[in-house]
Image (cartoon, grey):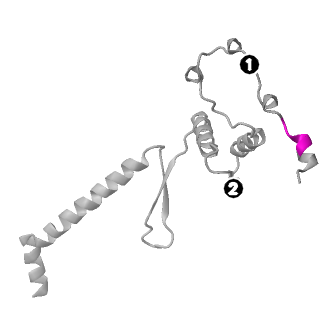
Amino acid sequence: MPDPVAARLRLAPEALTRRFSPEQFAFTNTDDLEPFRGVLGQERAVEALQFGVAMPRPGYNVYVMGEPGTGRFSFVKRYLKAEGKRQHTPADWVYVNHFEDSREPRALELPSGSAGEFINDMSGLIDNLLATFPAVFEHPSYQQKKGAIDR
């Protein structure tokens, strides 16, 4: 038996179509358009992101959630990249061994962008030491001194 309420709410196909004139558009096809960079229908989410990123104190975080494929990650990444260009670039921080207390590493503040060079220099130093130390211990003068001490 047909539902009378559903029958009254049923639309004719003509009611589902909206007529338009192609002359009302200033483009010939969608290739002429700039891609939309915003988040459609998410004004509150965009405002919350802007508010959260603008918090100048540590300890504030932004959590973004939503359905996969909605563009939230792309938008947040684009927004943070643009925001990052306007802000001061922070210093690089590296942690090195504290030989007196190995459970408490030492933090070194380096000029922005220089941590990679520091890491490469340290790797080079370690490689150099690993190559040099065995050669020193095998050198004849070291062996003579060691033999004298042993005797």
Tell me which residue sits at (71%, 44%) in the image: 49
x, y percent for residue 62: 69, 51
Judged from the image, the secondary structure of the residue bearing numbered disc 1 is loop
Rendered-image quadrant of the N terminus:
bottom right
User: Which corner quadrant of the image does residue 50 belong to?
Assistant: top right
Look at mark 1 in the image and give the residue it sits on.
20
User: Which corner quadrant of the image does residue 14 belong to?
Assistant: top right
Judged from the image, the secondary structure of the residue bearing numbered disc 2 is loop
Q: What residue type is labelled 2?
A: Gly
Taking the magenta stretch, the answer to whether it contains residue 96 is no
Q: Residues within 10 Å of mark 2 (few under 14, many from 20)?
A: few
User: Which corner quadrant of the image does residue 151 belong to?
Assistant: bottom left
Q: Can you say whether 106 is above or below 27 in the image?
A: below
Does 65 sit left or right of 91 as displayed? right
Range shown magenta: 7-11
Residue at the outermost top position: 23
